[in-house]
Image: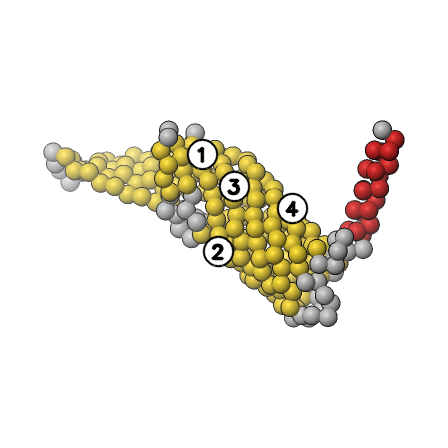
Amino acid sequence: MKKLSILVVFIYAFSYTQFLYADARAEFQVGMVSGDPELSFAGVTDDLDVDTGMNLGGSLWWDGIATPNLSLGVSVNRTMEADFSQTAALTFLGVTLTGTLDIEHDIDTLMVNAVFRDNSNEKKIHPYIGGGIGIAKTDADVTLSATVTVNGQAFTGVGTTSDDDTSFAAQFMGGVDFEITENVYVGANMGYFMTEADLFGAEVEFDNFRANLILGVTF
């Protein structure tokens, strides 16, 4: 037990020292997200044809952890506006029924990331590749609108409901940074994000491709 306690203290001290002397960076990113969620319900699976959405986020990085080219970081992201809308109409005996289903969802994530990045101070271009794990909170709103038309007279009804779920998430990413000044850089990256949420009794897999532009500062 005493040896285990000494090992834990050593690991904690080593980690603290690594972060204390590491170079730190902060990033702000904006971009787009695409990918149709896969919905499974009652043994039936189908894809939802959603719009291209928007991705906003920020990250904190520490460079040179344990090795010169290993960077560790935490990030928060929000994807939104990847909405689904479908309209169908049916006419029978002079009565027309029109229904519209709208689904809006937002995903907020908190991730811990690790990338291998060329952190050399002698270069202005820094490529990197890596990934991360964390949690995702998915919020979904469903609106069903129905219109019944009889002899030119329309009757409309609207129903709404919402659900949310928190789930495990993972991502892979790669990109490159370009130094503008000693403390400011810009960059671009692409990533693949995965999570599975339980919404309205259905399993929904979100496998998204993300492309971002980045503004970063070092301190």
- At mark 2, the secondary structure is strand
Name the one closer to the observer, 58 or 20.
20
User: Is 147 on the left-hand or right-hand side of 20?
Assistant: left
Q: In the rendered image of this protein, does residue 209 appear above or below residue 107? A: below
Amino acid carrying label 1: it is: Glu
Residue 176 visible at all: yes
- At mark 1, the secondary structure is strand
Give the residue displayed 19% in from the left and 38% down from the top. Answer: 90
Residue bearing the label numbered 4: 112
- At mark 4, the secondary structure is strand
Single out the mark in the foreground, 3 or 2: 3
Q: CA distance from mark 3 to mark 2?
A: 17 Å
Amino acid carrying label 2: it is: Met
Tell me where residue 164 appears, x and y as whole percent.
Answer: 50, 35
Farthest residue to the left: give it. 93
Q: Which mark is residue 203?
A: 1
Could you classify mark 3 by the number of other residues whose Cα lies within 10 Å: few (under 14), some (14-19), or many (20 or more)? Answer: many
Task: Kindly indicate whether the residue at mark 1 contacts the one at mark 4 (C-beta within 8 angstroms).
Answer: no
Q: Which mark is residue 32?
A: 2
Tell me where residue 156 appears, x and y as whole percent.
Answer: 27, 36
Q: Earlier in the sequence, mark 4 or mark 1?
A: 4
Residue bearing the label numbered 3: 195
